[in-house]
Image (tube, grey):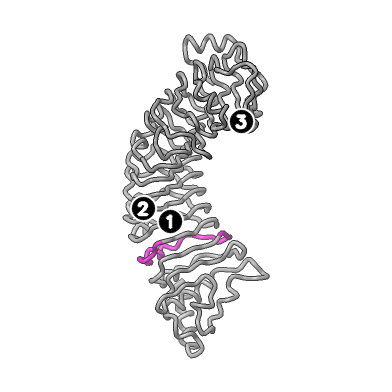
């Protein structure tokens, strides 16, 4: 890379009279290197077609370039319809006034250059949906002004640099859909609003301390384990929580389901146990989804989730009667989907002949309701064709409480 830079600098000296004078020389060197190491994949309308280095004003004619006082301050490489291939050059570090570096989805490969740590003014770094490999450089933790870091949908590996979540201005961290492994730091000090690490190979427990500013948290499709920390129920700004498809165990924190802003909760396919807890919850919220299916939750259903638009409680160990509040919520149209199949429920307060709204989906098959409810149910194919559990299963579970769902 040093040889390439030397050649580029000599080239600039030789042709300087024909080069634009309103762009800093180091920035021009970086742009030459970028054009040399990245390749257009669009033959008809290539992204670099506007990068004419003899143009009088690259800042106004180069695609993806924004300048202030002869310095490049924002660089957006490629567009959705103009993808790029190749590698990211170390000479990007010459753009020392850069505040935003964006790479559109494409086929860019190789590692993230360590030299990006020299871009101390960087606020936004987005290199999403390419084929970048190797670890996340620990050196990125020196970018003290970084607000947004999105490296999602690549092939990055290794562990999350522990100091990355100490950056004082980091608000958005998206590293989803890579091959990251190892554990998360137990304390996250950055004032994050959005943390998305889903679809990796992370292990270990959840951080015990998360920022109170957090609004979006996704760690689904990992290999994480341990209890859900009580600190989750103190996140009063949290609106979206997805911890599904992990190995979390133990109870759901008592007040988590009652958080005032939390309308999308995905905890399915873990090993969670205990009951739902109780507490006040805001009224019906259009678009709200709660999925607690495929766990080991047990006890009688509380009405804490009344009014959720799509409610998945199937494939657990719930017993007793379905709360009347849930049935009323379905009948008035607040709850459009209520899945309770594959539990040990013994009844549902539905009047004979009741007609549910056309948009409603209610499934209570494979429970312990005798006789089964006289209502037309809308069940998924995975519920199977058997309406009622065998009496032997219901009897054993009601006495011992140790039969799976």
The percent coordinates of residue 319 (x first, y second) are 49, 17
Near-viewer residue (165 or 171):
171
- The span from disc 2 to disc 3 (Cα, nearest Å) is 45 Å
Looking at the rendered structure, the secondary structure element under dot 3 is loop
Q: In the displayed structure, would residue 179 be above or below residue 299?
A: below
Residue range (magenta): 105-123
Residue depicted at 37% across the width and 28% down the height: 254
Give the number of callouts: 3
Upstream in sequence: badge 1 or badge 3: 1
The image quadrant that residue 145 belongs to is bottom left
Q: CA distance from mark 1 to mark 3?
A: 41 Å
Name the residue: 54% across, 55% down. Answer: 129
Q: Is residue 3 above or below residue 191?
A: below
Of 402 and 387, which appears nearest the observer?
387
Q: Which mark is residue 360?
A: 3
Q: Bin the neighbour count of mark 3 within 10 Å (Cα to Cα): few under 14, some 14-19, many 20 and up.
A: many
- 48 magenta-colored: no
């Amino acid at each position: 890379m040093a040889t390439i830079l030397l050649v580029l600098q000599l080239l600039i000296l030789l042709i300087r009279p024909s080069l634009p004078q309103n762009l800093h020389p180091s920035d021009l060197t970086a742009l030459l290197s970028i054009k040399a190491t990245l390749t257009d994949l669009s033959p008809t309308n290539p992204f670099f077609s506007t990068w004419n280095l003899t143009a009088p004003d690259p800042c106004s004619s180069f695609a993806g370039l924004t300048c202030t006082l002869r310095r490049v301050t924002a660089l957006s490489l490629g567009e959705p319809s103009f993808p790029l291939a190749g590698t990211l050059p170390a000479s990007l570090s010459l753009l020392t006034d850069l505040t935003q570096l964006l790479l559109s989805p494409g086929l860019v490969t190789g590692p993230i250059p360590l030299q990006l740590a020299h871009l101390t003014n960087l606020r936004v770094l987005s290199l999403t949906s390419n084929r970048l490999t190797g670890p996340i450089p620990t050196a990125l933790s020196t970018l003290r002004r970084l607000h947004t870091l999105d490296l999602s949908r690549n092939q990055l590996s290794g562990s999350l640099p522990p100091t990355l979540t100490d950056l004082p201005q980091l608000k958005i961290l998206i590293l989803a859909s890579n091959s990251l492994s190892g554990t998360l730091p137990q304390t996250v000090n950055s004032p994050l609003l959005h943390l998305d690490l889903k679809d990796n190979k992370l292990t270990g427990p959840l951080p015990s301390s998360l920022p109170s500013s957090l609004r979006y948290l996704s760690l689904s499709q990992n290999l994480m384990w341990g209890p859900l920390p009580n600190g989750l129920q103190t996140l009063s700004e949290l609106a979206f929580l997805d911890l599904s498809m992990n190995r979390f165990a133990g109870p759901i924190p008592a007040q988590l389901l009652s958080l005032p802003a939390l309308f999308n909760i995905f905890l399915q396919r873990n090993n969670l146990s205990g009951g739902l807890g109780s507490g006040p919850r805001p009224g019906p919220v259009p678009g709200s989804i709660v999925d607690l299916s495929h766990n080991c939750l047990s006890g009688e259903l509380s009405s804490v989730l009344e009014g959720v638009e799509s409610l998945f409680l199937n494939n657990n160990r719930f017993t007793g009667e379905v709360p009347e509040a849930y049935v009323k919520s379905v009948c008035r149209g607040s709850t459009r989907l209520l899945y309770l199949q594959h539990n040990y429920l013994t009844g549902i307060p539905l009047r004979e002949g009741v007609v549910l709204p056309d948009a409603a989906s209610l499934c209570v098959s494979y429970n312990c309701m005798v006789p089964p409810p006289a209502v037309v149910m809308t069940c998924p194919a995975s519920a199977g064709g058997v309406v009622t559990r065998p009496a032997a299963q219901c009897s054993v579970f009601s006495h011992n409480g140790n039969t799976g769902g």
